[in-house]
Each structure stands twice: as structure tokens, then as C-alpha cells.
Image: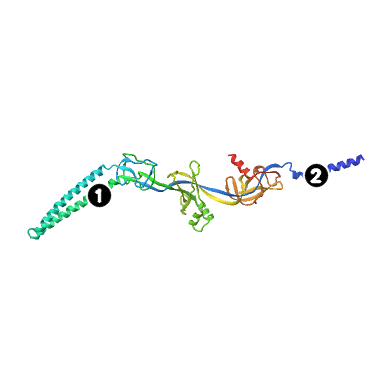
């Protein structure tokens, strides 16, 4: 009887050991825990960034039309001015003297005209009666015409001088903001100076100029709806402007023109966007970064921490029966620590979220499901 029970005990122990051996692969005593997530679809906006410089819609160089010393400045740098508003006064003492001389010449010519007219009038009846010859009358009439010509010349000279005196008050050609003023009172200036007195900029609307590489330009042509360049520009989304302090400008802009001609020296195409600036918060010459958005609707996304590269290809680890399996994926774009995936995974499929450094395909794991956003939130907090 004892021998019978001993046999049964040995059989039970063998069955127990065999059962444990069969369960061992499922329990995975050596499997490490990994955070796993389900692949979602999202609406994602990515941005292409371009350094940009702002210019007023109209930038008018202000130059004197006469030569002289700056006598007075009526405005200061940065002032808002109206078209026709005086900006500078050029010294006109010499012009005033010339105007007085020309005015005196006019008076002299008028006196000569009066004398010549009287002489001619006296000779007319005498010629008619044959008392004097016609030659004398013709001489008197010639003197009259000469006096009139002298007056006309003096009058033209006077008008020119007066015009120059008017030009001595340099006025703003447009509504806008006054730029830097490199010259001060007492400086000799003239129409041919290489540097203008100042620049007045119409800043109610500002142009943001930036350069797009030739490859970016052709990508734009390929990926933007429309048959013509104008159609494609009309389909472009509004752009944003990041100012030099890192803050976004409150008003969005619109890309208006692309030259389409590649600069041979730089290999780029010039692009112009416009921004409303009615509050005059921006100024001509400001710099910043332009953000051109790319919108993706209902696309598959995975955290970049869930991806790894091998021989120039990108993979994720999917989870099948608590085992990591390497899966090749195709990435469309990367934005905000997310990779936008074209194929290789499906919506709702489970992948390993982070900590891929020690993994190999076929490694058993202990899945720890977490929320998708928790992976990216953890990455953002680490910076």
C-alpha cells in the first residue's frame, strides 16, 4: 500500500512539473514591462519655417530738390506723418537774394517796356504824316519787343527761384512712418547725395519677404491644388509670423507672390507674404520667422519615441501575444514629437511606446497599456 501511494505521489509531481513547464512561455518569468499604446488617427498641422524680413508696402526715399544746409527738422525718427507734411527746411538765404534780384530785373524790364511803348506810340502818327521814316518806328517797336523779352526772361528766372524756395521745404511724399534721419541741422545736402534725408514707409500693410529653396518650390507646385500658379497661391493656407522675441503676431498673413525664377547664386525662389498692420505694431526692417502650415486630416500617428531606424528604414515594435515584433513603417512627416505614418500599422494596433533600446524582434514583454498622449507629455516635460 505504501508503495502504491508513493507511485501516485511521484506521478502527481511529474504532472505538476510538466504543467509548469507548459505555462512558463505564457507567464514569461524573464519578460520586462513596457508601456504600450494603441495607434490613433488625428488631425495634425506641421509647419515649414522661413526667416523673413518685413518691409513697408511703400518705402519712399526723401531727397532734397535743392542744395543747401539743413536749417530745421520738423519731425523726429519714428513719427507718423501725412502726405505733404513738412519734414525738413533747407536754408534759402542765397535763393532769397536771387529772387530779389530777379524781381528787380522784372521791374526794370517793365519800366523799359513803358518807355519803349510811349516812344512807339508817338512815332505812329508821325510816320502816317510822313514826318519821320518807318525805320524809326521799326526801331522803336524792336526796342519794345526787346524790353518785353527781357521781362519774360526775368519772370521765368524769378518763378524758378520761387519754385526752388518752395522746394526748400521738404515734404512727405506719402502717409507713413519716418525712418532714421542720418543728417542733422547744419548739414549740407543736395539732390545728388547717395543717402536720402530719410525714408517714409507706408506700414498699414507690411510685406514679409523670404526665400524658398528650389526643392521646396517644386514640392509646393506638386502638393498644392490648382492648375496655375495663381490657383495654387489661392489654395495656400494663411501663414503666421513669429517675432524676434518668440511671440506670434496676432494677425495671420497671406502669401501673395512667388517669383518662380531661381536665383542662380543662392538657388532660391523669392516669396512675399502680406500682413495687416493697421495698429502699427510692426515696423519696416523688423525680422522674424514665417510659419507655413501643412494640414493633415485623419492620419495615423505614432510617437517618435516609438520608432527606431535600421539601415535607413524606420520601424516600430508591434505587440503580438505579449511579444515585440518589428514592423516597417513609412513616415510622411514629423511634427511635435509625432511621426505621421502612411503605412505599416493600422488604427487601433498596439505598439510599444518607449524604451526600445534593449528590445529585439521576438522579445517577450509584459505589456503595460497607457494613454497615447502620456508618451508625448512625458517627452515634453523632460525638456
The numbered dot on residue 19 is 2
- The answer to whether residue 80 is left or right of residue 137 is right
**Rendered image quadrant of residue 121:** bottom left
Where is residue 141 shown, x and y percent of the image?
14, 56
Task: Depth check: give the residue in front, 4 or 243.
Answer: 243
Coloured how? rainbow
Q: Is residue 80 above or below residue 215?
A: above
Residue at the location (22% across, 45% down)?
Answer: 100
Residue visible at 69% across and 42% down in the picture: 33
Question: Label 1 vs label 2: CA separation?
Answer: 119 Å
Residue 131, position in %: x, y?
Answer: 7, 58
* Residue 268 in view of the camera: no
Q: Which mark is residue 159?
A: 1
Residue 336 locus on image (x, y percent)? 57, 45
Q: Which mark is residue 298?
A: none
Q: Nearer the viewer, mark 1 or mark 2?
A: 1
Q: Counting other residues with Cα less than 10 Å from the Cα at mark 1, is it few (<14), some (14-19), or many (20 or more)?
A: some
Between 380 and 210, the one lying in front of the other is 380
How busy is the neighbourhood of tag 2: few (under 14 within 10 Å), some, or many (20 plus)? few
* Location of residue 251 in the rendering, given as x and y in whole percent from the top left corner: 48, 47
Quadrant in the rendering for residue 199:
top left
Q: Is residue 359 left or right of residue 236?
A: right
- Looking at the image, residue 166 sits to the left or right of residue 180; the answer is left
Question: Element at badge 1?
Answer: helix
* Front one among 130 and 12: 130
* Quadrant, the N terminus: top right
Can residue 26 be seen in the rendering of this structure? yes
Query: In the rendered structure, which disc, 1 or 2, sits on the residue that comes first in sequence?
Result: 2
Residue depicted at x 59% and y 46%: 338
Label 2 element class: helix
Task: Please identify the residue farthest to the left as the structure is shown.
Answer: 131
In the rendered structure, the answer to whether residue 66 lies left or right of residue 293 reads: left
Amino acid at each position: 500500500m505504501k508503495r502504491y501511494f508513493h507511485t501516485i505521489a511521484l506521478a502527481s509531481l511529474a504532472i505538476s512539473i510538466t504543467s509548469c513547464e507548459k505555462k512558463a512561455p505564457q507567464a514569461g518569468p524573464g519578460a520586462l514591462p513596457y508601456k504600450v499604446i494603441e495607434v490613433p488617427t488625428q488631425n495634425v498641422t506641421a509647419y515649414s519655417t522661413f526667416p523673413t524680413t518685413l518691409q513697408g508696402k511703400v518705402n519712399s526715399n526723401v531727397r532734397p530738390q535743392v542744395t543747401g544746409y539743413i536749417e530745421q527738422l520738423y519731425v523726429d525718427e519714428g513719427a507718423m506723418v501725412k502726405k505733404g507734411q513738412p519734414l525738413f527746411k533747407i536754408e534759402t538765404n542765397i535763393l532769397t537774394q536771387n529772387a530779389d534780384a530777379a524781381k528787380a530785373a522784372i521791374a526794370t524790364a517793365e519800366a523799359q517796356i513803358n518807355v519803349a511803348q510811349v516812344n512807339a506810340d508817338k512815332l505812329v502818327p508821325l510816320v502816317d504824316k510822313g514826318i519821320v521814316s518807318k525805320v524809326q518806328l521799326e526801331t522803336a517797336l524792336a526796342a519794345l519787343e526787346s524790353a518785353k523779352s527781357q521781362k519774360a526772361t526775368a519772370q521765368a528766372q524769378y518763378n524758378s527761384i520761387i519754385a526752388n524756395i518752395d522746394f526748400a521745404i521738404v515734404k512727405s511724399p506719402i502717409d507713413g512712418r519716418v525712418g532714421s534721419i542720418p543728417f542733422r541741422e547744419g548739414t549740407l545736402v543736395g539732390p545728388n547725395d547717395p543717402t536720402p534725408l530719410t525714408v517714409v514707409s507706408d506700414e498699414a500693410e507690411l510685406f514679409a519677404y523670404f526665400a524658398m529653396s528650389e526643392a521646396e518650390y517644386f514640392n509646393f507646385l506638386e502638393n498644392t491644388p490648382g492648375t496655375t500658379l495663381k490657383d495654387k497661391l489661392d489654395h495656400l493656407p494663411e501663414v503666421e509670423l513669429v517675432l524676434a522675441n518668440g511671440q506670434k503676431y496676432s494677425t495671420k498673413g497671406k502669401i501673395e507672390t512667388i517669383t518662380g525664377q531661381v536665383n542662380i547664386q543662392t538657388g532660391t525662389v523669392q516669396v512675399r507674404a502680406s500682413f495687416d498692420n493697421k495698429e502699427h505694431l510692426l515696423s519696416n526692417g523688423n525680422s522674424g520667422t514665417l510659419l507655413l502650415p501643412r494640414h493633415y486630416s485623419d492620419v495615423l500617428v505614432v510617437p517618435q519615441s516609438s520608432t527606431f531606424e535600421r539601415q535607413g528604414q524606420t520601424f516600430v515594435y508591434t505587440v503580438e501575444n505579449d511579444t515585440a515584433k518589428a514592423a516597417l513603417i513609412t513616415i510622411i512627416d514629423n511634427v511635435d514629437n509625432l511621426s505621421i505614418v502612411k503605412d505599416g500599422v493600422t488604427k487601433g494596433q498596439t505598439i510599444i511606446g518607449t524604451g526600445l533600446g534593449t528590445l529585439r524582434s521576438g522579445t517577450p514583454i509584459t505589456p503595460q497599456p497607457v494613454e497615447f498622449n502620456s508618451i508625448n507629455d512625458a517627452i515634453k516635460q523632460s525638456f
